[in-house]
Image: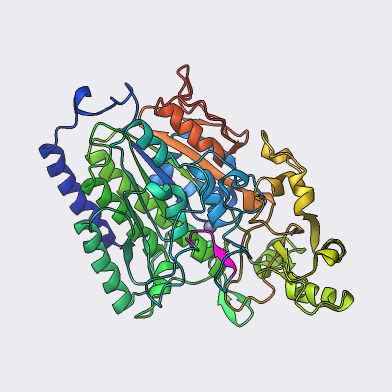
Amino acid sequence: MKPITALLPAVALLASACAAAQEQPRNITANAVAEPVEANAPTLVVAISVDQLSSDLFEQYRAHYTGGLARLLDGAVFPNGYQGQAATETCPGHSTILTGYLPANTGIIANGWADFTVARDRKEIYCAEDATLEPQQNAERYVASAINLMVPTLGARLKEVYPDSRNVAVAGKDRAALMMAGPTADAIYWYTGGDFGNFGASSSSAAVDRINEKVRGTIANGAGAIRYPEWCDTRAIPFRVGERIVGDGRFVLEPGDGRGFLASPRSDSAVLDIAAGLVIEHKLGGRGVPDVLSIGLSATDYVGHGYGTNGIESCLTVANIDTELEAFFSVLDASDIDYVVVLTADHGGLDIPERATAQGAPAAHRVDPALEPEAIGAALSEQFDLPVPALLGDAPFGDIYLNPAISAAQRAAVLAQAKASYTAHPDVAAAYTSEEIMATAVPQGDPRGWSLLERLRASHYPGRSGNLLVLLQPGVTPIPDPSSYVATHGSPWDYDRRVPIIFWREGISNFEQPLPALTVDILPSLMGVLSIDSDTQFDGICRDIMGGPESSCE
Ligand code: ZN
């Protein structure tokens, strides 16, 4: 359960929220702004992405929610939301949420890709970096940027209609904040290893400074085990994974462990505290024009990777989100802001095979290391007498690149043999060349019916994507050696694609729509709620969230 001290920032903000509300008349007249907000349109969009919150994980504990997640379940609930694309990773997933476009059009095909045309030695491109710039400090590996995102975000679209609109974001991960806010963020914060840095145009924030001081103190002093609600008890079963035991962890924080802070519910609590502080300081939703606040809760992902998804660690992390979200919403309520919330996830996830096999899924297993690109590539190099490694890639699945040093005369034959070598392996479901994928149309409609080729097409972007895309069989964990991460996501299967999509606004009717929706539907749906007309053809459609005779799409 949430420690009582964690409530204090929210309470303090609540008090300052009341003061701000008294100073600032909220009903700004129409002539005070360029464009009056449409009657009945909310003045704040709160977009929350819970990293690696699969529908499976969300639903597992649904009966127990009493806080912010329970409130959202009183709204418009799409339990079968989909990140439709094959590349179920953080960066592509976040790029779909506030753009209305699949990664095939956002250009964010993965967390990273290869670009053999860049001048620097390192040819790997991080999805959220500007590869044309050199880091200012040696400690930085890259210059964080949203420059690779090829389409506008909601924040950018709002500024077109309402130039005074503010686009604010905070997340545990830089790529979560950057892909939801895009390049036009006014204030944008993410965790930098010891505290949260401000990477936006706005000046420093007293609220964030105060929360950062608390974060640094927690990391410096360490912290004891987090108490968890009784309903998580049944999940506390230890499982051996390699040299480690997972399943019954309670997030004891060793002094100085900044990484451990991020990979615990404590970082989600800090992100929501900062979000509440930014609402107050930027007067979000209180200036007569619609603003957007993007929130990336990253702990669920680090916890999933570090401990798997079915242990007490994940249970506690979800329980903490339920509690902390309600504290955050209560700050908005106290500020009398008319806000609309959407909560979703960038992708789902799969539990560790060591636990899955003990819990009724005997076929779950770790991938054969013989599928690593170096291993397949070494055999190809020998067969074709190549002086270089034939294949480049960072995992035994996903984007695989032919070494650009391979001659034009040999490339087609090497690629055909690479495809044959992968598909011959029983852990592989399919492998398709970029050419085959690009001959397929970007899919639309019900994502359950998309073929594997169509799922691949949904996250394929020429010039960034690999020459060969490899998909593993369902239930295969693509981490051969679990000495650091033990579990992951990234497959084209529903445990990685299916995520909750939930809208909430005061006054809408509660409903649950079990037919599938896509995360690319979120942006057109929010444009509908905001009464912003657009002739743009999105990959998604407007979903009516009203639940009654009125429609938010007309
Ligand atoms: Zn993620």
Quarter that holds the N terminus: bottom left
Residue range (magenta): 123-130
* Left or right, residue 189 beside residue 407: left
Tell me if residue 140 can be seen: yes
Foreground residue among 303 and 339: 339
Asked whether residue 166 is drawn in magenta, I would say no
Query: Which residue is pictured at 77% across the width and 63% down the height?
Result: 363
In this rendering, the answer to whether 366 lies above or below 56 is below
Foreground residue among 380 and 227: 380
Q: Quadrant of residue 376?
A: bottom right
Tell me if residue 312 can be seen: no
Residue 162 appears at what percent x and percent y? 32, 32
Q: Residue furthest left?
A: 23
Q: Quadrant of residue 520?
A: top right
* Left or right, residue 212 beside residue 413: left
In this rendering, the answer to whether 10 lies above or below 240 is above
Residue 241 appears at what percent x and percent y? 63, 76
Scheme of image coloration: rainbow
Total labels drawn: 0
Residue 266 appears at what percent x and percent y? 37, 64
The kind of secondary structure the magenta stretch mainly shows is loop
